[in-house]
Amino acid sequence: MRATDMTTNATKANTQETNATKVGRRGLHGVPGLAPGGSALGPTARRLRALARAELTLLIRNRGAVVTALVVPLVLPLSVRPALDQLDLKKQGLSMGTVLLTTAIGFSFLFAVYTSLVSAYVARREELVLKRLRTGELSDTEILTGTALPATAVGLAQAVVLSVGCAALLHIGAPKAPQLLVPGVLAGLVVSAALAALTASVTRTTESAQVTALPLVLVSMVGSGVAIPAEVLPGRLASVCAFLPLSPAIRLVRAGWSGQLSAHEAFGALATALAWTIAAVFAVRRWFRWEPRR
């Protein structure tokens, strides 16, 4: 399946939507205004499903993207284990199992979602796929969301598998504050996807996608608590790093397992994550480039 074939699936979904609209106007079985399935979200769901299915096929056939999305988040946490052994985690109320699990989920945000989506957005733009999709019924939001669905689904699946596996193998038990863990994972996925679209807007070629994505990856690894727990950073530096894009998500995920986060701190992390999401979405709507950068 070529990248340009994505428009075929989107066109089929658009045709189904047109037929459904006509039936809805005539009425189904003589009932005026009743669309098939009785759901106003049906057409949008069909379009997103068609686009996500095409993007998933392209992702599976790209071996480099598969390795980056599936293998890297699982291997990298093992590479930081020696550095973590040199830290006094117990003094900060942390355990090795909790830190490694949070690290793995953080790497999933960065590699399974962020870097893979930067490459995907740039490749689809340069191949004129995004431009052709805009000529159909798909809205800009649907195009960006449908493209991001497979990567975010992979990130979510990894978070679930890692949580279950680490809970069993590292004996960290069940999360002590699941009400923080769930929004933390969701915030990490959404912020990573939004920042990927924003990074793609300043990336010229697919080959340079890894370079433009590198600054956020490095900053997040060091400052957001992905590779090194933010709790061991100096006080003033930790306060500044708390406002980095992925810091709130990582903080909520770790607190979900340790339970060491007050209601005030949890609210602050959620507010920061929401602010980054709104800012990233606004920036994408304003500056995302649909035309190839020549």
Image (cartoon, rainbow, N blue to C red):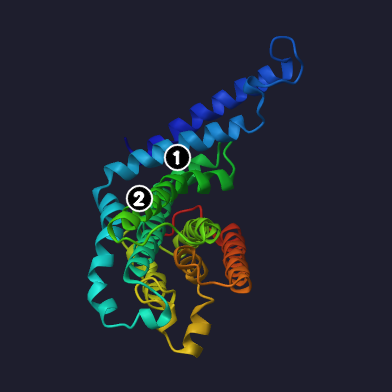
Answer few, some or many: residues within 10 Å of disc 2's Cα (few below 14, many 20 plus, some between 14 and 19): few
Circle 1 residue: 52
Determine the residue located farthest toward the right in the rendered image: 32
Residue nearest the viewer, comparing 188 with 82: 82
Side of 203 where 78 appears, left or right: left
Q: Is residue 198 above or below residue 142?
A: below
Side of 282 where 91 appears, left or right: left
Residue nearest the viewer, comparing 123 with 67: 67
Side of 208 where 125 appears, left or right: right
Mark sitting earlier along the chain (1/2): 1
x then y, percent, for residue 268: 61, 72
Check disc 2 and give the amino acid type.
Val
Circle 2 residue: 161
**Local SS, label 2:** helix
Residue at image x 56%, y 59%?
284
Side of 61 where 52 appears, left or right: right
